Amino acid sequence: MKEKIRYHALRLFDQNGFHGTSTRDISETAGCKMPTLYHHYGSKENLFDVVVRVAYIDLIEELRKRLPNELTPQDYCAAAVIQKKNLPVDELLVHRLAMKTWLGCEGCPDVRKKLIEWEAARNAKNETRLMELFSSCVWVKIITRTFMNLIERIILFDEDIPDAEIREEMRLLFEAALNKS
């Protein structure tokens, strides 16, 4: 039942937003009584946290493990963006809700704060790795922002950016950065 509640909550939060989804909606759709929902998740905020933030962190860690370690940073960035194009529905919904929450378009403030803290730590690690390649922090920021923009276009706007275009954009960025560093 716990998984069934999570399954339906994810879809309702995606469709109606955090504030537009009630625990009653979730329990009715999942086919359970309200006490069952509260027994498993405690509150709507906790359910949202588990369904979005916790699931997103698990997803990102799993996606990272799926990429080969021997990829160059340029190829790694391109592969990570392309990965997002091929997410199964549940993973796509988790990713989209996490992005909407992080951007402040959805969710509850506590979950957003935790998500921002986690993302900041992750981005700092990624930027540190890129700084090993480039002497200019400007290029690291440009690459990071371009990477995030491509993912936003894919996840939030459902753009089908061709793999070759993603690879070419990363190649051009890294090439320019290496030539300017």
Image (cartoon, helix red, strand yellow):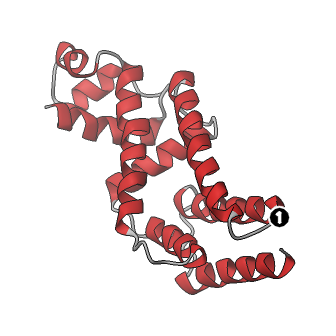
As drawn, the residue found furthest toward the right would be: 180
Residue plotted at (71% across, 59% down) = 145
Residue 114 x %, y %: 53, 30
Identify which residue, 30 or 89, lies in the foreground.
Answer: 89
Identify which residue, 137 or 146, lies in the foreground.
Answer: 137
Q: Quadrant where the C terminus lies?
A: bottom right
In which quadrant of the rendered view does residue 109 lie? top right
Q: Is residue 110 above or below residue 112?
A: above
Residue plotted at (59% across, 39% down) = 102
Residue 166 x %, y %: 60, 78
Q: Is residue 25 left or right of residue 112?
A: left
Q: How many marks?
A: 1
Q: Is residue 74 above or below residue 143?
A: below
In which quadrant of the rendered view does residue 53 lie? top left
Q: Is residue 71 above or below residue 13?
A: below
Identify which residue, 26 or 122, lies in the foreground.
Answer: 122
Residue plotted at (64% across, 40% down) = 103
In which quadrant of the rendered view does residue 33 lie? top left
Q: Which structural element holds mark 1? A: loop
Q: Is residue 124 above or below residue 131?
A: above
Residue 172 x %, y %: 73, 82
- Residue position marked by numbered label 1 in the rendering: 136
Residue 32 x %, y %: 15, 24
| Label 1: few (<14), some (14–19) or many (≥20) C-alpha neighbours in 10 Å | some
Identify which residue, 170 or 84, lies in the foreground.
Answer: 170
Q: Quadrant where the N terminus lies?
A: top left
Inspect the image, locate mark 1, and give the three-letter code of the amino acid beneath it. Ser
